[in-house]
Amino acid sequence: MVATTHHTTLIIGGGSAGVSVAARLRRAGITDLGLVEPADTHCYQPLWTLVGGGCAPLASSVRPQACVMPAGVAWVRDRAETIDTDNQVVTTAGGTRIGYEYLVVCPGIQLDWTAIPGMGEAVTTPWVSSNYTYELAPKTWEIIRSLRSGTAVFTMPAGPIKCGGAPQKIAYLACDYWRQQGVLDDIRVVLVLPTPSLFGIREFADVLAKVAARYRIEVRVSSELIEVDPDARRAVVIDRVTGATDDIAYDLMHLVPPQSAPDWIKKSPLADPTDPAGYVCVDKHTLQHTRYPNVFSLGDSSGSPNAKTGAAVRKQAPVVVANLLSVMTGQPAARQYDGYASCPLTTARNKMLLAEFDYSMRPHPTFPPRLVNAQKERRDMWYLKRYGLPLMYWNLLLKGLA
Ligand code: FAD
């Protein structure tokens, strides 16, 4: 079969992962580099938590995609639809066939709005929102600041999601606002988590338990939202340990949809056939595909078992680039990713603790704890989240410098 175009190296997805890998490859002198990305705007999604919490303007989370695309990269403004690994061809929604010798796959994660009955309809009503989309994040702040009494429900789905801390961060920002307004005592706050505790690492779970207690949040662990009745404003929550269900009447709800690999990736030869979530099947250290050595994947669509965050992308991009350059010269992929990820947990409107960890699920602090103990709530960490990390993202990460 003949492809209509060809790039020696092709990247699918121009989000955090795709742009930083492209920038690093260009810095390494790689030419004939194509990048498939349908969106005209590039989003810095971590800011959406602060947008929903009324602490940052939505406009500061976006820039034109053209401004972040590294010079010398051929931008294919289209959506990849299929990958033919035998013939090394990617086909786009517009019908273009692009041949490749090396492929980097990073089209992000899919939000499965229909996975929970009533959820998709609920977010169109005036009482429900989600920080997980650009359009809805400002609505979260509107409904938080309008609430003066009643019941507020914050949910997190089971399974991997991007930024596992985001479902609870917005609950803390909301509670701190209601506390400042003097209405927190009149609001019942329910936080529904599928996990057995507030965080998978005890050191951080202990701090968060104190934060939740401070706001008198009713934390439902090992529990999940299984149905929403948007007309009656009722949320059905199941306790996975006892099997008991609870029908909660809400006045505000912040939803996080279940997530999985994009459907077209699930159906592609790159997915792990044993994993129903369908992520790209890579070695968790080298990020090289387990069956196709000319294919790499990183970011949210990769099947490596790290926490899906931009922080993970920052550590994965140099590994993918080093290993890709090795494979191009016939060397083995030797550089290893250790599973590093971090979660800046905003616990108040001026405080944050920075959970950093790796595959060992032990704390992995960047700052020496004797100098900066980022495992407790700190005001300087808040400034890092609000101003430092966005600056680093736009000026260093996307330019392949961090
Ligand atoms: P994305 O950045 O989502 O990029 C995927 C790109 O692929 C997009 O540009 C998309 O348009 C494109 N694409 C999609 N389909 C196709 C296709 N078929 N063909 C070609 N291109 C396609 N991370 C942190 O580190 N810290 C945080 O505090 C944090 N907070 C978050 C809060 C929220 C509310 C959310 C939603 C995310 C947060 N994250 C956080 C997670 C972080 O944003 C993601 O982990 C990161 O963006 C993953 O990068 P990616 O390149 O894999 O995916």
Image: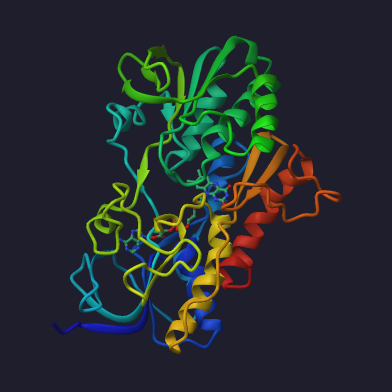
Q: In the rendered view of the protein, which quadrant contains the C terminus?
A: bottom right
Q: Which residue occupies 49% across, 72% down?
A: 320
- Residue 212 versus residue 325: which sits nearer the camera? 325
Please state if 256 lies on the left or on the right of 176 as rendered.
left
Q: Position of residue 157 (x, y in %)?
A: 41, 34
- Residue 136 versus residue 196: which sits nearer the camera? 196
Ligand 1: which quarter?
bottom left
- Residue 85 versus residue 232: which sits nearer the camera? 85
Q: Position of residue 110 (x, y in %)?
A: 35, 49
32 over 370 or under it: above or below: below
Image quarter of residue 228? top left
Image quarter of residue 217? top right
Image quarter of residue 344? top right
Q: Which residue occupies 37% across, 19% down?
A: 235
Please state if 205 lies on the left or on the right of 26 as rendered.
right
Q: Position of residue 357 (x, y in %)?
A: 63, 50
Q: In the rendered view of the protein, which quadrant contains the N terminus?
A: bottom left
The answer to whether one can see residue 72 in this image is no
Please state if 351 lies on the left or on the right of 36 as rendered.
right
The answer to whether one can see residue 212 in this image is yes
Going by the picture, which residue comes out furthest to the left?
1
- Residue 23 versus residue 297: which sits nearer the camera? 297
Please state if 32 lies on the left or on the right of 388 as rendered.
left
Q: Position of residue 373 (x, y in %)?
A: 80, 45
Colour scheme of this structure image? rainbow
